[in-house]
Image: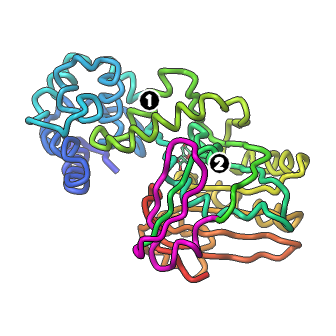
């Protein structure tokens, strides 16, 4: 992590290398400000895990989304609606100087947080069937739920397709999410029926309340300004979920602190508990990781339960990865079924982190 200004400058340079192709506007900005001590010092005093380029970029984006007439906004595809044109560095430095106090306030009080509904394409594949004979509706328990958008995954629509040109379309809600299935035919992998969700519980130490426009804007600001499609999809999901927010229960706290009560709620409502971690376990502290694993095994021994996770094995070696290579930084989708006291593990596949594709494994 970045302890000194030199470390931070190196972090900005490295980040520019990593994202340059996918996010040219942010790549150019990060390269340009790596040598600007005045800009980098905005992150002075920010605790280490958050002392990263993405936090500064999110804070600036947050202010710009509310001030589209700023000259810098002209360089942001998310605001101008055009691919980034011209060199944004001078405007970025000028903006950071003029609105420094507001940016410092944001980086000191917030952490970068996203909620990607694209991952619902993968979770949807992994969900247990609610067809007979299983039949019980699902009690969805999303650990690290962020804004809770994926608790409403049955309200989105899905198009799964494969390289042979076959496709499976499910539902007619919004957003419409697309996932390319590779390695197996789409008809074998895509869900074949609607899902019945009886209960929705999200757990997060820092849940985002999207009924508060400022919090919703922060969620949007954490999406990179170059990722116009992702931002548009987020907006559509926010609009869809706005009408159903009251149907989800959001519990504040760490996953293992609130999991037991969520599973108890689900069982009391005669729902089959399905616990989900998508890119959240990676943010747990070490002891919380062990606690959650022990708790799931105990809860799974006490009654039927499904646990689905989509995480990067190299960042979460504590998870039960089975035969998966734990040095990989790719996102891997796995499911653990606890049924009648027995435990069964399945690797569903290697996936795009935002659900754009799945390399399906032979289950
Ligand atoms: C990258 S976001 C992913 C959000 C969502 N799961 C998704 O896939 O879009 C990570 C989330 O994990 C949450 N988180 C961090 N530590 C956690 C913990 N100990 N227990 C539960 N959630 C945690 C963060 O607050 C954040 O909302």
Relative image position of residue 285 (x, y in whole percent):
57, 53
Task: Indicate left or right for 205 with 62 as reference.
Answer: right
SS type, badge 2:
helix
**Residue closer to the observer: 343 or 80:** 80
Give the residue at mark 2: 154
Is 185 colored magenta in this rendering?
Answer: yes
Is 168 colored magenta in this rendering?
Answer: yes
Which residue corresponds to the image point at 52% horizontal and 72% vertical from the top-left? 186
Up/down of 158 relative to 39, above or below: below
Which residue corresponds to the image point at 19% horizontal and 40% vertical from the top-left? 83
Say whether residue 234 is visible. yes
Up/down of 153 relative to 124, above or below: above
Give the residue at mark 1: 218
Among the two numbered marks 2 and 1 on one chain, the one whose residue lies closer to the N terminus: 2
Say whether residue 314 is visible. no
**Range of magenta residues:** 163-191
Which residue corresponds to the image point at 39% horizontal and 44% vertical from the top-left? 230
Is there CB contact under 8 Å for labels 2 and 1? no
**Residue closer to the observer: 68 or 167:** 167
Q: Which mark is residue 196?
A: none
Q: Quadrant of residue 208?
A: top right
Up/down of 326 relative to 246, above or below: below
Relative image position of residue 6 (x, y in whole percent):
20, 46
């Amino acid at each position: 992590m970045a302890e000194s200004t030199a470390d931070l400058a190196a972090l900005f340079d490295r980040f520019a290398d990593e994202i340059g192709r996918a996010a040219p506007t942010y790549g150019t900005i990060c390269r340009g400000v790596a040598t600007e001590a005045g800009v980098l010092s905005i992150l002075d005093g920010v605790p280490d895990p958050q002392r990263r380029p993405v936090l500064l970029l999110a804070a600036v984006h947050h202010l710009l989304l509310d001030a589209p007439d700023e000259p810098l906004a002209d360089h942001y595809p998310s605001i101008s609606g055009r691919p980034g044109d011209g060199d944004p560095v001078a405007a970025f430095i000028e903006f950071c100087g003029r609105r420094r106090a507001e940016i410092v306030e944001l980086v000191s009080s917030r952490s970068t947080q996203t909620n990607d509904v694209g991952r619902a394409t993968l979770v949807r594949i992994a969900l247990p069937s609610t067809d007979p004979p299983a039949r019980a509706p699902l009690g969805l328990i999303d650990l690290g739920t962020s804004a809770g958008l994926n608790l409403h995954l049955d309200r989105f629509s899905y198009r799964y397709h494969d390289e042979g040109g076959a496709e499976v379309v499910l539902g007619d809600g919004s957003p419409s999410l697309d996932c390319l299935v590779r390695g197996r035919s789409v008809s074998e992998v895509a869900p074949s029926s609607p899902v019945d969700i009886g209960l929705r519980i999200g757990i997060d130490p820092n849940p985002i309340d999207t009924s508060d426009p400022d919090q919703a804007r922060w969620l949007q600001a954490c999406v990179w300004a170059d990722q116009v499609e992702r931002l548009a999809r987020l907006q559509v999901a926010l609009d869809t979920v706005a009408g159903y927010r009251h149907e989800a229960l959001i519990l504040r706290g760490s996953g293992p602190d609130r999991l037991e009560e969520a599973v108890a709620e689900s069982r009391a409502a005669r729902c089959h508990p399905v616990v989900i971690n998508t890119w959240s376990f990676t943010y747990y502290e070490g002891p919380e990781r062990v606690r959650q694993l022990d708790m799931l095994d105990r809860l799974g021994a006490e009654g039927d339960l499904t646990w689905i996770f989509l995480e990067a094995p190299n960042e979460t070696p504590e998870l039960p990865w089975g035969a998966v290579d734990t040095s990989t930084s790719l996102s891997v989708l796995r499911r653990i079924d606890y049924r009648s006291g027995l435990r069964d593990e399945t690797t569903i596949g290697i996936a795009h982190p935002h659900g754009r594709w799945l390399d399906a494994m032979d289950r």
